[in-house]
Amino acid sequence: MKLSNKEFDKIVQRAIRRIPDEIRQHLANILITVQQWPDPGLLEEMGYPPDEPLLGVYWGVPLNERSVAEPPLFPDTIYIFKGPLEEMCTSLEDLEEEIEITVVHEIAHFIGISEERLAELGYE
């Protein structure tokens, strides 16, 4: 599947609207950006195997690790990687669902939602 950046961005917006309010409300101060592929340096820094597709990543300081004395220097960002998502999905519906799941998991890293709670919400 290959989409234009504009088409992909529309699907990202639809996927975000599907996220339950309980989780979506935390996106207010998070930048979401789409990149074609993860940077090899990022994969190496994360210890991520280069042959395993990375669909998205949260980059920032999780809420439970923040300090009033040392606020984050950069905005919290969720990166969505278009290339790996396009390669793994076979339909627009599948793509929208995978983007939703990816964004929810990255928000969970930011706010500290447990894997159990994600499972209760249907995001295993």
Image: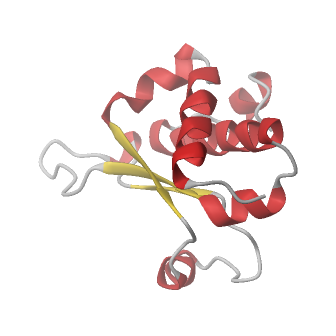
The image quadrant where one finds the N terminus is bottom right
- Residue 85 picture location, percent across and down: 71, 57
Quadrant of the rendered image containing residue 17: top right
Q: Is residue 98 above or below residue 41?
A: above
| Point 82% across, 41% down: residue | 94
| Residue that lies at the very extreme toward the right in this rendered image | 90
Q: Position of residue 77 (x, y in %)?
A: 39, 51
Relative to 75, 90 lies left or right: right
Residue 105 position within the rendered picture, expressed as x and y whole percent measured from the top left: 63, 43
Q: Determine the residue located farthest toward the left in the rendered image.
A: 69
The correct choice, above or below, for 123 with respect to 65 in the image is: above
In the image, 97: left or right of 64?
A: right
**Relative horizontal placement of residue 99, taking residue 73 as reference (left or right):** right
Where in the figure is residue 55, as x and y percent of width and height?
66, 58
Q: Residue furthest top?
A: 21
Picture quarter with the C terminus: top right
Horizontally, is 117 left or right of 6 in the view?
A: right
Q: 82 or 3, which is in the foreground?
A: 3
User: Which residue sits at x=57%, y=78%?
Assistant: 43
- Front residue (pair 68, 38): 38
Q: Residue at x 51, y 24 (%)?
A: 24
Q: Quadrant of residue 48?
A: bottom right
How many marks overall? 0
Whether residue 115 is situated above or below residue 122 in the rendered picture: below
How is the structure coloured here?
A: secondary structure
Query: Residue drawn 54% across and 15% down?
Result: 21
Q: Nearer the viewer, residue 23 or 79?
A: 79
